[in-house]
Image: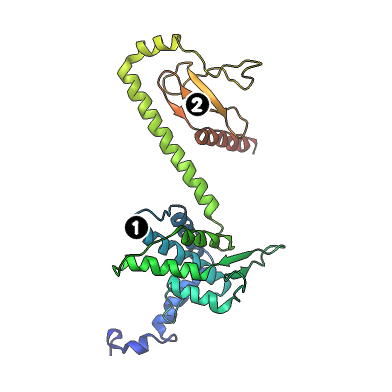
Protein backbone atom coordinates (compact mmCIF):
# COMPACT_ATOMS: atom_id res chain seq x y z
CA UNK A 1 0.00 0.00 0.00
CA UNK A 2 1.44 3.40 -1.01
CA UNK A 3 1.71 6.36 1.33
CA UNK A 4 -1.25 8.14 -0.28
CA UNK A 5 -3.40 5.07 0.25
CA UNK A 6 -2.71 4.80 3.99
CA UNK A 7 -5.67 5.44 6.28
CA UNK A 8 -5.87 9.06 7.49
CA UNK A 9 -5.88 7.89 11.12
CA UNK A 10 -2.47 6.28 10.60
CA UNK A 11 -1.02 9.45 9.06
CA UNK A 12 -2.28 11.45 12.04
CA UNK A 13 -0.34 9.34 14.53
CA UNK A 14 2.43 11.42 16.19
CA UNK A 15 4.84 8.47 15.88
CA UNK A 16 4.32 8.14 12.12
CA UNK A 17 7.71 8.56 10.33
CA UNK A 18 6.44 11.40 8.15
CA UNK A 19 5.05 13.31 11.13
CA UNK A 20 8.21 12.74 13.15
CA UNK A 21 10.29 14.03 10.23
CA UNK A 22 8.23 17.23 9.93
CA UNK A 23 8.43 17.82 13.67
CA UNK A 24 12.18 17.26 13.77
CA UNK A 25 12.74 19.71 10.92
CA UNK A 26 10.69 22.33 12.76
CA UNK A 27 12.74 21.77 15.91
CA UNK A 28 15.97 22.45 14.02
CA UNK A 29 14.82 26.00 13.31
CA UNK A 30 12.80 26.59 16.47
CA UNK A 31 15.50 28.24 18.54
CA UNK A 32 16.91 30.33 15.71
CA UNK A 33 15.61 31.51 12.39
CA UNK A 34 12.04 30.30 12.89
CA UNK A 35 11.62 32.25 16.12
CA UNK A 36 13.23 35.33 14.60
CA UNK A 37 10.89 35.10 11.63
CA UNK A 38 7.87 34.87 13.92
CA UNK A 39 9.02 37.87 15.92
CA UNK A 40 9.58 39.90 12.76
CA UNK A 41 6.22 38.98 11.21
CA UNK A 42 4.46 39.80 14.48
CA UNK A 43 6.09 43.24 14.64
CA UNK A 44 5.81 44.07 10.93
CA UNK A 45 2.09 43.29 10.90
CA UNK A 46 1.29 44.87 14.26
CA UNK A 47 2.84 48.28 13.55
CA UNK A 48 0.89 48.49 10.28
CA UNK A 49 -2.39 47.35 11.77
CA UNK A 50 -5.27 49.82 11.65
CA UNK A 51 -8.79 48.60 12.47
CA UNK A 52 -10.39 50.85 9.86
CA UNK A 53 -8.31 49.59 6.92
CA UNK A 54 -9.60 46.96 4.48
CA UNK A 55 -7.88 43.63 5.04
CA UNK A 56 -6.96 44.40 8.64
CA UNK A 57 -8.56 41.13 9.72
CA UNK A 58 -5.94 39.04 7.90
CA UNK A 59 -3.11 41.23 9.21
CA UNK A 60 -4.38 40.83 12.77
CA UNK A 61 -4.59 37.05 12.45
CA UNK A 62 -1.09 36.85 10.97
CA UNK A 63 0.40 39.01 13.71
CA UNK A 64 -1.41 37.18 16.49
CA UNK A 65 -0.59 33.68 15.28
CA UNK A 66 3.11 34.44 14.87
CA UNK A 67 3.31 36.26 18.19
CA UNK A 68 1.58 33.50 20.12
CA UNK A 69 3.60 30.80 18.36
CA UNK A 70 6.83 32.53 19.37
CA UNK A 71 5.69 32.82 22.99
CA UNK A 72 4.43 29.26 23.33
CA UNK A 73 7.47 27.79 21.55
CA UNK A 74 9.81 29.48 24.01
CA UNK A 75 7.78 28.83 27.14
CA UNK A 76 6.72 25.25 26.36
CA UNK A 77 8.79 23.91 23.44
CA UNK A 78 6.70 21.68 21.23
CA UNK A 79 3.34 22.87 22.53
CA UNK A 80 3.01 25.30 19.63
CA UNK A 81 2.52 22.37 17.23
CA UNK A 82 -0.26 19.82 16.98
CA UNK A 83 0.12 16.06 16.67
CA UNK A 84 0.97 16.40 12.98
CA UNK A 85 3.77 18.84 13.67
CA UNK A 86 1.87 21.82 12.31
CA UNK A 87 1.77 25.13 14.14
CA UNK A 88 -1.52 25.56 15.94
CA UNK A 89 -4.02 28.28 15.07
CA UNK A 90 -4.25 31.45 17.13
CA UNK A 91 -7.32 30.12 18.94
CA UNK A 92 -5.53 26.87 19.80
CA UNK A 93 -2.43 28.73 21.00
CA UNK A 94 -4.63 30.81 23.29
CA UNK A 95 -5.98 27.54 24.68
CA UNK A 96 -2.43 26.39 25.42
CA UNK A 97 -1.73 29.57 27.38
CA UNK A 98 -5.01 29.53 29.30
CA UNK A 99 -4.46 25.88 30.24
CA UNK A 100 -0.90 26.39 31.49
CA UNK A 101 -0.95 29.85 33.07
CA UNK A 102 -3.03 30.71 36.15
CA UNK A 103 -5.56 33.44 35.45
CA UNK A 104 -5.40 36.67 37.42
CA UNK A 105 -8.63 36.73 39.37
CA UNK A 106 -8.86 40.53 39.42
CA UNK A 107 -7.98 41.45 35.84
CA UNK A 108 -8.93 38.25 34.04
CA UNK A 109 -5.67 38.18 32.09
CA UNK A 110 -3.08 35.41 32.05
CA UNK A 111 0.29 36.76 33.26
CA UNK A 112 3.35 34.94 31.93
CA UNK A 113 6.29 35.73 34.25
CA UNK A 114 9.64 36.68 32.75
CA UNK A 115 12.46 35.01 34.65
CA UNK A 116 15.18 36.14 32.22
CA UNK A 117 15.86 39.36 34.13
CA UNK A 118 16.45 40.09 37.79
CA UNK A 119 13.21 42.01 38.20
CA UNK A 120 10.73 39.84 36.40
CA UNK A 121 8.05 41.42 34.25
CA UNK A 122 4.80 39.73 33.38
CA UNK A 123 3.50 39.46 29.85
CA UNK A 124 -0.21 40.06 30.24
CA UNK A 125 -2.10 37.88 27.79
CA UNK A 126 -5.70 39.05 27.55
CA UNK A 127 -7.07 35.77 26.28
CA UNK A 128 -10.71 36.85 26.27
CA UNK A 129 -10.07 39.99 24.20
CA UNK A 130 -7.73 38.22 21.79
CA UNK A 131 -10.16 35.35 21.39
CA UNK A 132 -12.92 37.83 20.59
CA UNK A 133 -10.59 39.44 18.06
CA UNK A 134 -10.10 36.06 16.40
CA UNK A 135 -13.86 35.51 16.30
CA UNK A 136 -14.50 38.92 14.79
CA UNK A 137 -11.80 38.62 12.13
CA UNK A 138 -12.73 35.05 11.19
CA UNK A 139 -16.27 36.18 10.43
CA UNK A 140 -14.98 38.52 7.74
CA UNK A 141 -12.09 36.41 6.48
CA UNK A 142 -14.27 33.38 5.81
CA UNK A 143 -17.34 35.25 4.54
CA UNK A 144 -19.49 34.21 7.47
CA UNK A 145 -20.85 37.66 8.18
CA UNK A 146 -19.79 41.04 9.53
CA UNK A 147 -17.03 41.34 12.08
CA UNK A 148 -15.33 44.33 13.62
CA UNK A 149 -11.71 44.63 14.70
CA UNK A 150 -11.46 47.14 17.53
CA UNK A 151 -8.66 49.10 19.18
CA UNK A 152 -8.92 46.92 22.28
CA UNK A 153 -8.02 43.91 20.15
CA UNK A 154 -4.98 45.74 18.80
CA UNK A 155 -3.98 46.87 22.31
CA UNK A 156 -4.11 43.27 23.54
CA UNK A 157 -2.02 42.22 20.55
CA UNK A 158 0.61 44.89 21.24
CA UNK A 159 0.80 43.81 24.89
CA UNK A 160 2.33 40.51 23.77
CA UNK A 161 5.50 42.39 22.81
CA UNK A 162 6.56 42.41 26.47
CA UNK A 163 7.46 38.74 26.13
CA UNK A 164 11.15 37.95 25.73
CA UNK A 165 10.50 35.99 22.53
CA UNK A 166 9.25 39.17 20.83
CA UNK A 167 10.23 42.66 22.05
CA UNK A 168 10.40 43.78 18.44
CA UNK A 169 7.78 46.51 18.07
CA UNK A 170 10.03 49.46 18.94
CA UNK A 171 12.65 48.42 16.41
CA UNK A 172 10.07 47.88 13.69
CA UNK A 173 8.41 51.21 14.44
CA UNK A 174 11.78 52.98 14.25
CA UNK A 175 12.53 51.33 10.92
CA UNK A 176 9.15 52.42 9.64
CA UNK A 177 9.84 56.03 10.67
CA UNK A 178 13.18 55.98 8.85
CA UNK A 179 11.63 54.42 5.75
CA UNK A 180 8.87 57.02 5.68
CA UNK A 181 11.40 59.82 6.18
CA UNK A 182 13.43 58.60 3.20
CA UNK A 183 10.34 58.42 1.01
CA UNK A 184 9.24 61.90 2.06
CA UNK A 185 12.71 63.32 1.46
CA UNK A 186 12.92 61.74 -1.98
CA UNK A 187 9.51 63.15 -2.89
CA UNK A 188 10.51 66.60 -1.63
CA UNK A 189 13.66 66.55 -3.76
CA UNK A 190 11.69 65.61 -6.87
CA UNK A 191 9.19 68.42 -6.27
CA UNK A 192 12.00 70.93 -5.79
CA UNK A 193 13.78 69.80 -8.96
CA UNK A 194 10.55 70.06 -10.94
CA UNK A 195 9.99 73.57 -9.59
CA UNK A 196 13.53 74.63 -10.52
CA UNK A 197 13.03 73.29 -14.03
CA UNK A 198 9.88 75.37 -14.26
CA UNK A 199 11.34 78.73 -13.18
CA UNK A 200 14.87 78.24 -14.54
CA UNK A 201 18.30 78.97 -13.03
CA UNK A 202 18.21 82.71 -13.71
CA UNK A 203 14.92 83.18 -11.91
CA UNK A 204 16.11 81.03 -9.00
CA UNK A 205 19.26 83.15 -8.69
CA UNK A 206 17.20 86.36 -8.81
CA UNK A 207 14.90 85.13 -6.06
CA UNK A 208 17.88 84.14 -3.93
CA UNK A 209 19.07 87.76 -3.89
CA UNK A 210 15.79 88.96 -2.43
CA UNK A 211 15.50 86.23 0.22
CA UNK A 212 15.13 87.27 3.85
CA UNK A 213 15.81 84.77 6.60
CA UNK A 214 12.68 84.39 8.78
CA UNK A 215 14.71 82.55 11.41
CA UNK A 216 17.71 84.86 11.57
CA UNK A 217 19.67 85.00 14.79
CA UNK A 218 18.99 87.86 17.19
CA UNK A 219 20.53 87.94 20.67
CA UNK A 220 17.30 89.16 22.23
CA UNK A 221 14.37 88.29 20.01
CA UNK A 222 15.62 85.03 18.47
CA UNK A 223 18.65 83.63 20.31
CA UNK A 224 18.10 80.17 18.76
CA UNK A 225 18.05 81.52 15.21
CA UNK A 226 20.30 80.12 12.47
CA UNK A 227 22.04 81.54 9.43
CA UNK A 228 20.88 80.44 6.00
CA UNK A 229 22.72 77.41 4.63
CA UNK A 230 23.32 76.03 1.18
CA UNK A 231 20.35 74.09 -0.14
CA UNK A 232 21.30 70.53 -1.18
CA UNK A 233 18.95 70.73 -4.18
CA UNK A 234 19.36 74.15 -5.79
CA UNK A 235 22.81 74.89 -4.34
CA UNK A 236 21.85 78.40 -3.24
CA UNK A 237 22.42 79.80 0.25
CA UNK A 238 18.70 79.88 0.89
CA UNK A 239 18.03 76.92 3.17
CA UNK A 240 16.26 78.15 6.31
CA UNK A 241 17.18 76.09 9.38
CA UNK A 242 14.24 75.52 11.70
CA UNK A 243 15.69 72.82 13.95
CA UNK A 244 18.88 70.90 14.71
CA UNK A 245 19.29 67.12 14.87
CA UNK A 246 18.88 65.39 18.22
CA UNK A 247 22.49 64.20 18.18
CA UNK A 248 23.87 67.73 18.20
CA UNK A 249 25.95 67.48 15.03
CA UNK A 250 24.34 70.51 13.44
CA UNK A 251 22.31 68.85 10.70
CA UNK A 252 19.38 71.15 10.21
CA UNK A 253 15.78 70.53 9.33
CA UNK A 254 13.91 73.24 7.49
CA UNK A 255 12.98 74.50 4.04
CA UNK A 256 14.65 76.19 1.10
CA UNK A 257 13.23 79.66 0.47
CA UNK A 258 13.74 79.33 -3.29
CA UNK A 259 13.10 75.78 -4.49
CA UNK A 260 10.91 74.87 -1.46
CA UNK A 261 12.81 71.65 -0.69
CA UNK A 262 11.84 70.43 2.80
CA UNK A 263 14.11 68.40 5.08
CA UNK A 264 12.23 66.87 7.97
CA UNK A 265 13.48 66.43 11.52
CA UNK A 266 13.59 62.67 10.98
CA UNK A 267 15.79 63.09 7.90
CA UNK A 268 18.13 65.41 9.78
CA UNK A 269 18.37 62.88 12.61
CA UNK A 270 19.18 60.09 10.17
CA UNK A 271 21.91 62.20 8.56
CA UNK A 272 23.37 62.85 12.00
CA UNK A 273 23.20 59.17 12.92
CA UNK A 274 24.98 58.18 9.70
CA UNK A 275 27.65 60.78 10.46
CA UNK A 276 27.98 59.48 14.02
CA UNK A 277 28.39 55.87 12.87
CA UNK A 278 30.94 56.88 10.23
CA UNK A 279 32.84 58.82 12.87
CA UNK A 280 32.95 55.84 15.21
CA UNK A 281 34.01 53.53 12.38
CA UNK A 282 36.87 55.85 11.49
CA UNK A 283 38.24 55.49 15.03
CA UNK A 284 38.44 51.69 14.80
> Mark 1 — residue?
55
Q: Can the viewer see residue 74?
A: yes
Q: Secondary structure at mark 2?
A: strand
Q: Quadrant of residue 223?
A: top right
193 left or right, relative to 171: left
Q: Is residue 31 above or below residue 188?
A: below
- Residue where numbered disc 2 is placed: 254
Q: Position of residue 91 (x, y in %)?
A: 44, 73
From mark 1 to mark 2, how far is it between C-alphas? 37 Å
Q: Which mark is residue 211?
A: none
From the top left corner, tell me how far across and down residue 180 is, in percent. 44, 41
Q: Quadrant of residue 62?
A: bottom left
**Among the two numbered marks 1 and 2 on one chain, the one whose residue lies closer to the N terminus:** 1
Give the crowd class for mark 1: few <14, some 14-19, many >=20 residues within 10 Å. Answer: some
Q: Nearer the viewer, residue 103 or 248?
A: 103
Where residue 199 sits, quadrant-wise, is top left
Q: Where residue 105 sits in the image (x, y, percent)? A: 62, 74
> How is the model colour-coded?
rainbow
Q: Residue at x 49, y 46 (%)?
A: 175
Q: Which class describes the residues within 10 Å of circle 2: few (<14), some (14-19), or many (20+)?
A: some
Disc 1 element? loop
Amino acid sequence: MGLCARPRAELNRPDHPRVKCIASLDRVHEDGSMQQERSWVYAACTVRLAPDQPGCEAVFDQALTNGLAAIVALEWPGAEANARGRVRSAAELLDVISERVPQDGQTGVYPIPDTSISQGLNTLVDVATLRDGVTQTQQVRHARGPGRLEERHVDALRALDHHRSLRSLSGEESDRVWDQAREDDRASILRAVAFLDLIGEDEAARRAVDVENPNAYHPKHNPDGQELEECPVCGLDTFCIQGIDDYGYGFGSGQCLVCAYVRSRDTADEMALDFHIARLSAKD
